[in-house]
Structures are given as structure tokens and as C-alpha cells.
Image (cartoon, rainbow, N blue to C red):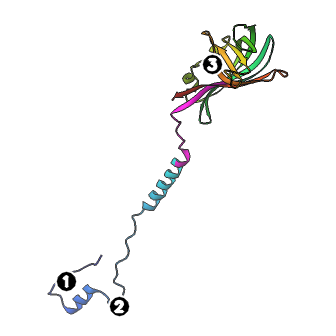
Amino acid sequence: MIRITLCSLTLGLAALAGCTGDKGGDSSPAPDSPPEGDADTDADADTDADTDADTDTEPLPFEALAGVEGSATVFAGSYTGVEERYLDAEGVDLCRIRYTVSFVAQRDDCEGCVWAADLQFSDVELLTESDGGCGVLGYPDPAALEGAGIAYGFQTEFQGHTSVMLADEGSGWNAESIGAWDESAGTFTYDWRFGYIEL
């Protein structure tokens, strides 16, 4: 900014010289400097932004996969296994409940099944819960699974295709999941996916 100073015409030459100042010096105005405290404020703002970036978490997806995975040892007239019911949001367990699955009685009404049995749950344990996930899964109180039951059956070939696990939850047998059973070792594994639930 150029500073212009008006001097009275009645002043003498000496006064005029005093008004214009020393021509030998640098008459350029000093650069404006920020008000004291601005630099600190900027630094604080940067720190706040960094802190926000560090503490922000990724939002949950709009839906999560519900299901039950299990393994058991199964022979004629016996079934001893463990299941975990889960609600998975792209690798994040919102709910995971583990329990023992035990033999109750053999079933003979599962057409085409190599074996079939009524089963009962016990020793229920909540492994993980986040954001009310077990309530979304349908188990706000996981202990409610204690003493509940289901029936499972196994077919080595279902409708000309792969081996499957069948389940009867009280309304008849339905093929629910691909399953694998080793007859000699008795090992049985499956991952029954119920489908996606909106969060």
C-alpha cells in the first residue's frame, strides 16, 4: 500500500523535507504480518483435523450376513457337535454365539438321508456382540437358545447334485446348506447361510 501524506502549503522547505522523509532510505512499506495468535490458531486447527482423521471409524455397511456354521462327529445313533450363529458385516462380527449340539433321537422320516436326528442346544456362550447385533440376528438374549432344538439330516447327493445338509425346524425337511460328511471318521461340517439382514 502506498502511503500519501499531505503537507500544508504554508510549511517551509525544511518542513516539506521533513514530511517526505529521507530519500536515501527504503520507503517501501513493511509487509503485513498476521495478527499475533493466528499461527497458533492454524496449528490448532491442523491438529484438530489430524485428530478427527485418526478417530473417525468406517461406517457399517447397510446389510450383514446371518448364518450358522458348525462341525460334529456323527455316527448311527449319535451326534456330538458345536455350532456358532453369526451376523457378519463384511468381516466384522456383530454377533457370534457358540453352543453345543447333542443327539436326542434318531429320525427315519428324512427321505433320501443317510442319517437324520433330533438335536438339542446347550452350554450357550456369547462370543461377540457389537452395535446390538444379536438383537438384529433375533437373539437379544442368547441364553434363550439353551434347551432349544432342531433336526438335521444329510444326503450324499441332492437332486443329482452335491451333498447337502437338511434341517427340520418344526415344519418339515428342507435342504439348507452344502454339507460334508466323512462316513469313516464321522466328521460333519457345514455353513448354513440364512441370508442378508438390513442394518
Determine which residue is flagged by label 2. Answer: 24
Alpha-carbon span between mark 2 and mark 3: 90 Å
| Residue 71 is a magenta residue | no
Question: Residue 86 location in percent, x, y?
Answer: 63, 26
Query: Which amino acid is tagged 3?
Result: Pro
Question: Residue 149 location in percent, x, y?
Answer: 67, 11
Q: Residue furthest left?
A: 10
Label 2, secondary structure: give it: loop
Left or right for 141, reference 119 = left
Image point (69%, 11%), residue name: 111
Image point (23%, 91%), residue name: 14
Determine which residue is flagged by label 3. Answer: 142
Q: Earlier in the sequence, mark 2 or mark 3?
A: 2
Q: Quadrant of residue 120?
A: top right
Can you tell which of label 2 and label 3 is closer to the viewer? 3
Query: Which amino acid is tagged 1?
Result: Cys
Q: Which residues are magenta?
A: 53-68
Q: Residues within 10 Å of mark 2 (few under 14, many from 20)?
A: few
Label 1, secondary structure: give it: loop
